[in-house]
Image (cartoon, rainbow, N blue to C red):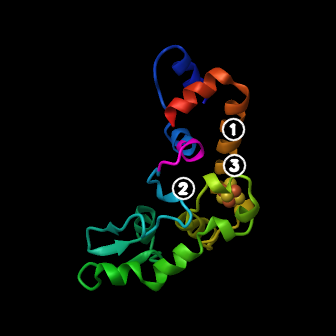
Amino acid sequence: MRRILQINRSGTPFREFYAALILTRMLTDRPIGYVDLRSPAGVGIGALVYNYDGCVFASDEGRMLAETGDNTFRLGHVNEDDYTSLILSDRLIEAVSSSLTQCAPECSTCAFESHCGADPVYHHATQGDTLGIKPLSAFCARQKGIMTLLLDILENSPEDASIMRRWA
Ligand code: SF4
């Protein structure tokens, strides 16, 4: 981030993509369309992924997980299931209902909750739990780290803060 902000200060506009997504969440009311920064998570309800073999998944990461033999996020097949049965499948309802940060342990009392989201596929893949154990989650650690850094810059570095506001 220091290097990227230095490039911007020297006159070349250059956005750090993930920071820009988080800043848009923090500083504006515009939707960012990023499925892992929503509550409930955007799996299935923000995207359906149709694989080359006709299988339909709740997300691209869910499709990739299936390549390892784990079909947890396979919602159905294009020859057998219509949109309604995919979107109302028990698997999707389970994934979406366990991804509400407003009532998830740790998230519900977290200062960053309103700017954060859930990543049920990542937490299932790494912890075997779609809800996720946030104190042990690299997703959570990354979110806390990035948001702490961005807020520190916004609060204490006016020149860099004005660059970051433009990213949003
Ligand atoms: S930073 Fe971690 S604890 Fe806080 S809302 Fe995000 S995932 Fe939950």
Residue in the image at 64% along x and 65% along y: 101
Residue type marked 2: Leu
Residue type marked 1: Leu
The earlier-in-sequence mark between 1 and 3 is: 3
Label 3 C-beta lies within 8 Å of the nearest ligand 1 atom: yes
Residue in the image at 48% along x and 15% along y: 11
100 or 5: nearer the viewer: 100
Residue 51: in magenta span: no
CA gap, disc 2 to disc 3?
13 Å
Query: Where residue 144 is drawn, which disc sits there?
Result: 3
Q: Residue 131 location, x and y as percent?
A: 63, 71
Task: Report whether 90 appears left or right of 79.
Answer: right
Ligand 1 position by quadrant: bottom right
Q: Dot 1 lies on which element?
A: helix
How many residues crowd around disc 2 within 10 Å: few (fewer than 14), some, or many (20 or more)? Answer: many
Q: Residue 34 location, x and y as percent?
A: 47, 54
Q: Residue 56 location, x and y as percent?
A: 34, 74
The quadrant holding residue 57 is bottom left
The quarter of the rendered structure image containing the N terminus is top right
The quadrant holding residue 55 is bottom left
Query: Where residue 37 is drawn, which disc sits there?
Result: 2
Residue 28: in magenta span: yes
CA gap, disc 1 to disc 3?
11 Å
Query: Where residue 42 is drawn, which disc sits there?
Result: none
**Can the viewer see residue 137?**
no
Residue in the image at 55% along x and 26% along y: 163
The earlier-in-sequence mark between 2 and 3 is: 2
Q: Which residue is mark 1?
A: 151
